[in-house]
Image (tube, rainbow, N blue to C red):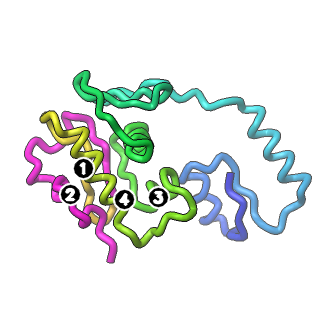
Amino acid sequence: FMLTARDAVADRVAGLDSGADDYLTKPFALAELLARLRALLRRGPELAPGVVTVGDLVVDTHAQRATRAGRDLGLTTKEYAMLEYLARRAGRVVGRAELSEHVWDDNHDPLSNVIEVYIARVRKKVDGAGGPPLISTRRGAGYIRAAPADAPADPAADPGASGGASGDAVA
């Protein structure tokens, strides 16, 4: 749900396309806000799968654990949240701003390199047992959790595979 002062059609379309269920602009009537919230609650819980599987990576959202080729990855809470977010969006580029918004809280400094550090940690744990790398960097765009057939066979082909802070170019 988005509540904002930006009321141009392009802003509303962008908000809804980015995943918002509803878009309300300021000023607004409290009765309208409450009616929209009731309508959202009537939709019921989103039916997201409890287990996300991409190749040999299995993310169990109920147990909040991940395995690759049957091996437990031993992720921290934040590493797990990042991997789950990427796994649910397999095949789609996820930018730093989106990761920051959905995995970190409001106190996250968007200029820090914490996202690159966590991507490197998750890569090390996910790809540590070998096999094709599962998280690729798209320079200037973000990260993509590709299916194993789409993942580069050679880590040198993925400029961000080293886990360096250059993963998502920020000018």
Q: Closer to the camera: disc 1 or disc 4?
A: 4
Mark 4 residue element: helix
Q: Which residues are magenta?
A: 142-171
N-terminal of the two: label 1 or label 3?
Answer: 3
Tell me the kind of residue under disc 1: Ser
Question: Foreground residue, 41 or 83?
Answer: 83
Q: Secondary structure at mark 3?
A: helix
Q: Is residue 6 above or below residue 93?
A: below
| Disc 2 to disc 3: CB gap under 8 Å | no
Between the residue at mark 3 and the residue at mark 4, the CA separation in whole angstroms equals 8 Å
Asked whether 101 or 108 is in front, the reply is 108
**Residue at 80% in and 46% down:** 36
The residue singled out by tag 2 in the image is 160
Q: Around disc 1, counting alpha carbons within 10 Å, would you say few (fewer than 14), some (14 to 19), or many (20 or more)?
A: many
Q: CA distance from mark 2 to mark 3?
A: 18 Å
Task: Identify the mark nearer the N-term, 2 or 1.
Answer: 1
Instruction: Kindly report the secondary structure that dominates the magenta region of the rendered protein.
Output: loop
Q: Earlier in the sequence, mark 2 or mark 4?
A: 4
Q: Are marks 1 and 4 in contact (CB under 8 Å)?
A: no
Who comes first in sequence, dot 3 or dot 4? 3
Q: Magenta stretch: residue 40 in it?
A: no
